[in-house]
Image: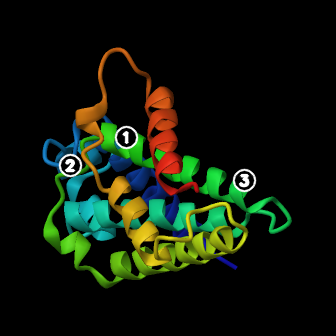
Amino acid sequence: MTTLKERQYQLRETMIIEAMYELLVKKGFTATSMDDVATRVGISKATLYLHFKSKTELALRIIVQQINDVASSIESLEPTLPVMERVRRTLYAGIQRRVKMGAAKIDILPEEIFSDPKYQTAQRHMAELGSTLILEAQRAGEIRSDLPAPLIQRFIANMFNMDVEGLIDGNNSLEQLSDQIYDLIVRAIRP
C-alpha cells in the first residue's frame, strides 16, 4: 500500500510532466525554463529538482512516454483487423502525435536525449513493431514488396523526424496536415 506522501510525490511528478508538455507545445524546448515549469505547477524550483535533475531529463521523459504510448496503441490493435487498417491506424496516430509535437517546436533538443539508452530502447521497440507490421502487409500484398521492409520502415521513421513546423501554415489545421502526410506515405508504399 502506498503512503499519502508517496501518492503526493507521484501526483506532483505527473503535474510536472503535464506542465512541461504544455510549455513545450506553447513555447518550445529552448524557450522553456525550469522556472517556467515550477511556476506553472505552483512549486519551488528546489522541489522540481527533487523530481528531475534537468530540463533535458524532463523532456526525455516526455518524449520516451510519447514513443511508448504509440507503441502501446500499436500493440493494442485487434489482430483480426485487416492489416492495412492496422497500418492506417498506426500511421495516423503517429503522425498526429508528431504533428502536435512538431507544432511544439520540440525539434530543437539536446543530442544527449537521442543518445540516452531509454530513448534508444523505445525507438528500437517502435522500429520492431513497425517492421513486423510492414512485413505482414507485404505478405498480404498491401505494401510494395519490391522494396525491402527495413527501407520502408526507415522511410516512415524519417517522415516522423522531419521539420513539421515548417509544414504548418495558416491554411491547414493540424488535422489536415496529418491527413496530407498520411496520404503521402501511403501513396509511396502501396503497390
Is residue 103 in sight in this rendering?
A: yes
For residue 50, which quarter of the picture? bottom left
Above or below, comparing residue 118 to residue 11 in the picture:
below
Identity of the residue drawn at 14% across and 64% down:
110
Quarter of the image containing the C terminus? bottom right
Kind of residue indicated by mark 3: Glu
Whole-angstrom CA distance, mark 3 to mark 2, is 34 Å
- Residue 22: which numbered mark, if any? 1
Mark 3 and mark 1 lie on one chain; the one further toward the N terminus is 1
Mark 3 or mark 2, which is nearer to you? 3
For the residue pair 54 and 8, the one nearer the viewer reads as 54
Q: Secondary structure at mark 1?
A: helix
Kind of residue indicated by mark 1: Glu
Mark 3 and mark 2 lie on one chain; the one further toward the N terminus is 2
Q: Residues within 10 Å of mark 3 (few under 14, many from 20)?
A: few
Residue 59 coordinates in the image, percent (x, y):
29, 60
Identity of the residue drawn at 16% across and 48% down:
33
Residue 85 coordinates in the image, percent (x, y):
72, 53
Mark 3 or mark 1, which is nearer to you? 3
Mark 2 and mark 1 lie on one chain; the one further toward the N terminus is 1
Whole-angstrom CA distance, mark 3 to mark 1, is 31 Å
Kind of residue indicated by mark 2: Phe
Whole-angstrom CA distance, mark 2 to mark 1, is 11 Å
For the residue pair 47 and 100, the one nearer the viewer reads as 100
Q: Specify the color scheme.
A: rainbow
Q: Secondary structure at mark 3?
A: helix
Most extreme residue toward the top is 171
Q: In the picture provided, is 91 more to the left or to the right than 21?
A: right
- Residue 85: which numbered mark, if any? 3
Quarter of the image containing the N terminus? bottom right
User: Badge 2 is on which residue?
Assistant: 29
